[in-house]
């Protein structure tokens, strides 16, 4: 998140401030991580020191049959354990101090404050967002492929709100995964179009639906994934018409109609205005 925000510091208010906060979080987490790694190294050194001291003491006993006071004093002077214990204490203090920063600055109510600031930045990015682009090819079918009739379908009701230059579509789709409603504006024609879409409550759909009288289509949609593409076959229920669409990543993407669909294709109608949904609406 920090690195995403760094490039926005000059155009979005508070982005630079959030970058500084994320730097502080990185420092605190880095301090905790370094303390954990160092503590593990100290623990390993303690084990090694204890084993080494045991070997030296055992060697003294084997050599002399006993361990005199002078030998004990020499061992105490050579023993690194007190220093390692003190170092472990310092590392624990550093880790706890870093954790307090994370706890006070990033958790609890601070977490909600952080999310609120990030949501504000996301909203501020709205005007800079590139419009969504829809790239799809459309095909006229002579009939619905038989195997699709045995598959679950989404029942779609869609209509167009009054407008001369802006054509806004509202849609309700009911299928195995539930019901959803959307409002959509599309700009352009043919293979590549801009699309602006957002979900809306069903209560809003119900309120707007009467305004679409005389500008509606009804259909069942079957979605079939074939290789890297998902083909959507629309069987219109208000007329004798079946269309297939496939959305593409780019306008120069080559499309091969799959074997299960090819026998039903009459022709491609991507550039034929009479097969655009808004022109089919009645």
Image (cartoon, rainbow, N blue to C red):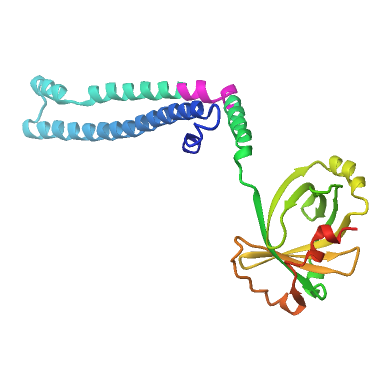
Residue closer to the observer: 122 or 155: 122
The outermost residue toward the left is 64
In this view, the residue farthest toward the bottom is: 263
Displayed quadrant of residue 264: bottom right
Looking at the image, residue 95 sits to the left or right of residue 273; the answer is left
Residue lying farthest front? 164
Q: In the picture shown, does residue 34 fall above or below 101?
A: below
Pinpoint residue 86: horizontal percent, then vertical percent.
28, 21
Look at 28% across and 31% down and name the residue there.
42
Residue at (51% x, 20% y) in the render: 104
Asked whether residue 104 is drawn in magenta, I would say yes
Q: Quadrant of residue 118?
A: top right
Residue placed most toward the observer, 90 or 233: 233
Residue 85 x, y percent position in the rendering: 28, 23
Q: Can you see residue 150?
A: no
Residue at 61% across / 42% down in the picture? 129
Q: Position of residue 176 (x, y in %)?
A: 79, 56
Closer-to-camera residue (26/121): 121
| Magenta part, dominant SS | helix
Work out whether residue 64 can be spotted.
yes
Horizontal side, residue 157 vs residue 138: left or right: right
Residue that appears at 10% across and 24% down: 71
Q: Position of residue 275 (x, y in %)?
A: 80, 65
The one nearer the camera, 14 or 131, is 131
Which segment is the magenta one?
101-111
In which quarter of the view is residue 235 placed?
bottom right
Q: Does the magenta segment cover residue 114? A: no
């Amino acid at each position: 998140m920090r690195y995403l925000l760094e490039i926005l510091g000059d155009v979005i208010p508070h982005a630079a401030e959030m970058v500084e906060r994320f730097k502080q979080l990185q420092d605190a987490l880095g301090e905790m991580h370094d303390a954990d790694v160092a503590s593990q190294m100290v623990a390993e050194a303690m084990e090694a020191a204890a084993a080494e001291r045991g070997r030296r003491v055992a060697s003294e006993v084997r050599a002399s049959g006993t361990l005199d006071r002078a030998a004990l004093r020499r061992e105490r002077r050579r023993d690194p354990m007190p220093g390692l214990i003190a170092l472990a204490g310092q590392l624990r203090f550093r880790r706890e101090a870093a954790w307090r920063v994370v706890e006070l600055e990033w958790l609890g109510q601070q977490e909600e404050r952080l999310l609120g600031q990030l949501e504000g930045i996301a909203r501020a990015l709205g005007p800079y967002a590139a419009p969504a682009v829809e790239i799809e090819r459309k095909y006229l079918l002579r009939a619905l492929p038989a195997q699709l009739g045995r598959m679950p379908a989404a029942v779609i009701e869609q209509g167009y709100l009054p407008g001369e230059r802006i054509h806004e579509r509202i849609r309700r789709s009911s299928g195995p995964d539930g019901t959803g409603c959307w409002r959509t504006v599309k700009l352009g024609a043919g293979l590549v179009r801009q699309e602006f879409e957002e979900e809306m409550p069903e209560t809003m759909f119900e309120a707007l639906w009467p305004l679409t009288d005389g500008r509606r289509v009804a259909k069942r949609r079957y979605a079939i994934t074939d290789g890297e593409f998902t083909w959507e076959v629309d069987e219109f229920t208000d007329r004798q018409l079946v269309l297939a669409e496939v959305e593409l990543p780019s306008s120069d993407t080559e499309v091969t109609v799959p074997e299960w669909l090819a026998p039903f294709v009459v022709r491609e109608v991507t550039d034929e205005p009479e097969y655009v949904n808004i022109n089919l609406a009645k």
